[in-house]
Amino acid sequence: MVNNPYNPAFGAVPTYYVTNSWISDKFLSGLDNLTDKWRETIVTGIRGSGKTTVISDIIGKAATRDDVVVISGNAGTSELLPEIVAGMQRKLPRLPKLKTLGVKLPAIFDLGFEMPTKSASFRYDIEDMLAFAQTQGVTVVIAIDEVQKHSEALRDYVAAYQQWKMQKLPVATILAGLPSAINDMLNDDVLTFFKRANQIKLAALNEQDILTNYAQVFGDRVPFNLINEMAEGAANYAFMFQLIGFNVWLMNKTAYTKNDIDSALEVSKRGLFKAVYEPMMTDLSQNDQRVIKASLAAMDGNVIVYAKLRELTGMNENSISTYRLRLINAEILTVAGRGLLKYKQPYFKEFLEAYYTEI
């Protein structure tokens, strides 16, 4: 059996990586110009929208260049700064152009070098390595995933990064995180430098691209009316596009029926609920969750009536408007008209009905 061409695993670059590959191309081409806006890029979107995949794509494409090295780190760990130092110590000396030339490395590249324990040490350690990279015509990309709220390590990183940029050192960065975390970062008084960064909000996929892809992959095995059902089921969402394709392919049939496709869609929805919506709810504060749970009872048809939502939560106008804005920034709710809201993500109402029936 041919390997499944769809991959719903977070962070992996799937065989069919539609619409967002242009981001990595733009970012890498921007490295040729010190003033290019793409050298400081922030990518945001909900879980499953493809943020980590963008970083993985950049790492993969950068590997074909001998003048770029990518150092990756996760802002969700307490070891972010030492990880960056260790990454540079290991990766810079291994660039083919440096190994071929037999360049003598400064002492800081000794793997026994003591890791920084203070942000000031981190700044100057990286500064020394960037200065060396500059002499060799190498640009260092620092990619940080899972940007967190109130991260001291991230604050130290951004403060140091600003100094490296002022010295025109060969460094670029790409940050990725959930909308609420990115919003928190940009509103931090210490991190105002990144308000000027290039911001990319991952867009929904194009339904025609999804339809075309499914038709090409499954061909005559799936009738076109069912291909159309698959494309509609993906709801223009990158994770669902991969999930549905993965689950249909997994059945390994020479001819698919409507029952097969409906079954794959249901399995995919459950995968979406578990991998995306459950963690999304866990990340919310108790009052955020309270508002979300009450939204089900505040629905009139397909929209949520804001006045009824306020009544059900028992919150005053200031409180309910605060949580309304928070949930819009988190891309869970969106405005549907005057005094009306709706769920922004596909199948979110079904998820709430299945798991959260009480306020």
Image (spheres, helix red, strand yellow):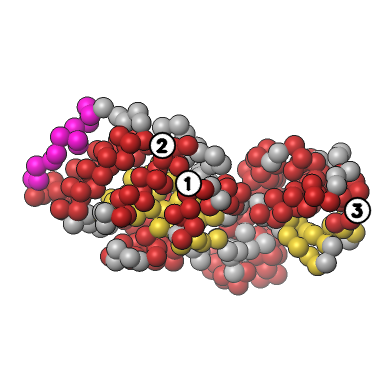
Q: Nearer the viewer, mark 1 or mark 3?
A: 1
**Residue kind at label 1, given as amino acid type:** Val
Judged from the image, the secondary structure of the residue bearing numbered disc 1 is: helix
- What is the x, y in percent for residue 153? 44, 37
Q: If you read the primary sequence from the N terminus, does the residue marked by circle 2 or circle 1 appear first?
A: 2
Using a 10 Å C-alpha cutoff, classify the residue at mark 3 as few (fewer than 14 neighbours), some (14 to 19) or many (20 or more).
some
**Residue, x 26% and y 38% (percent of image)?**
125
Mark 3 = which residue?
308
**Residue kind at label 3, given as amino acid type:** Lys
Query: In the image shown, does 160 or 86 lie closer to the viewer?
Result: 160
Name which quarter of the figure residue 71 lies in. top left
Mark 2 = which residue?
80
Specify start and end residues of the magenta stretch as a single range: 102-113
Q: Is residue 165 magenta?
A: no
Task: Say left or right for 207 vs 20.
Answer: right
Mark 1 = which residue?
190
